[in-house]
Image: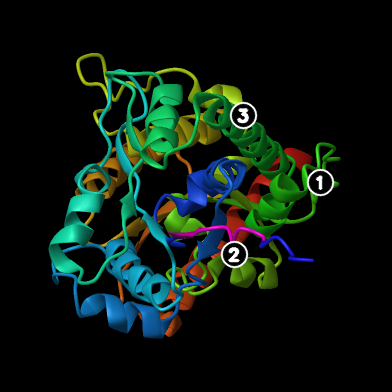
Amino acid sequence: MLMSKVKKRKKIGIPQALLYYKYFPFWRAFFEGLGLEVVESGRSSKVLLQEGNQYAIDEICIPLKLFYGHIASLLKKKIDYLFLPRYISTSVDTYMCPKFLALPDLIRATGNNLPPIVEMSVNMKKKPFFFSALETGRSLGKSLFLTHSAYTKAISAQNLFLQAMQAGRSFDDALNAAQQRVSLFPKYPSASHKIRIALIGHGYNIHDAFINMDLLKKLKQMDVHPVVIENLPSDIFEGKTSVNRSLKNYWGNEEEILSALHYLSEERSVDGIIFLCSFCCGPDSLIDEIAMRDMKLAGFPYICVVLDEHTGQAGLITRIESFVDMVAFRKRAEELEKRC
């Protein structure tokens, strides 16, 4: 008797960089719902950065240089498709950073022997997000019914990821929760005796341990309870941030950072703020100037740490340790003043 052959699922490669740290739960569930096997490029490393530097120009930020390295890693894994999302706008009144607008074009212009590229062009100024997903499914030859089903599962996975992060889980734990459809996330007990410091910045700077030299782990070793953007209440990101009465934020990928800074300085739920930004990132530089002004007026401990491939670990740790010591001294002084 002839055995029927099981049709092998095609593989789609997703670089573990840039917006991976924001939307991967959605992407993974969506493509798996379409019947594809998702292949990740792996964690960032010095080797990937060296490979990326062969293709990237010197004037771009380290997250984008690493992205090229992740592409090179995926090309070695015999994938059938390469996923390169094009995020133009995630709200009706902002634009994303130019690197996200042109990401597929950048890779096409510098890459050789690339597999078919799957784009998900997201432009909320022109169309709802569902239509972006629908177009992506259609480009892969999938039916409307299957695409809608995959989209629904992907939205659910993304929501579970965010719920896990808001409950205080780590990025990796939240990814696993979204994959396993875990929906109950009891809050971790508060560590009131510890210093609480918010680590603010783009997900690829906060959660990529190679870029930031495993700063989250090092803060915990300093007996600091780190707080990241995803741990904050979701409703604080619903409104539009105004820099002042005449100037509104233009960059969509900076909106979360501004909202988080405003919330943290008002609520005083942390003892200090560390802003991680990338060298050569124009939007980050602008936000840092705004943040320094606002935090100085609020009398709130704040430091900006600029990251690139030349950042030395010893210098970074020295700056962070000095900041933590200053925040600890300030907190002790405030507690002593309250007792008197």
Majority SS type along the magenta span: loop
Q: Measured from the top left, where is residue 256 in percent x and y? A: 44, 35
Residue at 28%, 48% in the rendered image: 284
- The disc labelled 3 sits on which kind of residue? Ser
* Start-end of magenta stretch: 6-13
- Image quadrant holding the C terminus, namely top right
Q: Earlier in the sequence, mark 2 or mark 1?
A: 1
Residue assigned mark 1: 190
Compute the Cα span from label 3 to label 2.
36 Å
Q: Is residue 3 left or right of residue 273?
A: right
Residue at 33%, 78% in the rendered image: 49
Q: Marks 3 and 1: CB-CB under 8 Å?
A: no
Front of the two marks 3 and 1: 3
Residue assigned mark 2: 216
In the depicted structure, whether residue 139 falls above or below residue 127 = below
Residue assigned mark 3: 149
Q: Earlier in the sequence, mark 3 or mark 1?
A: 3
Under circle 2, the secondary element is: helix
Around disc 2, counting alpha carbons within 10 Å, would you say few (fewer than 14), some (14 to 19), or many (20 or more)?
many
In the depicted structure, whether residue 196 falls above or below residue 308 = above
Q: Is residue 116 visible?
A: yes
Residue 66 falls in image quadrant: bottom left
Q: Measured from the top left, where is residue 47 in percent x and y? A: 39, 85
Q: Is residue 22 magenta?
A: no
Front of the two marks 2 and 1: 2
Residue 166 falls in image quadrant: top right
Q: Measured from the top left, where is residue 136 in percent x and y? A: 40, 37
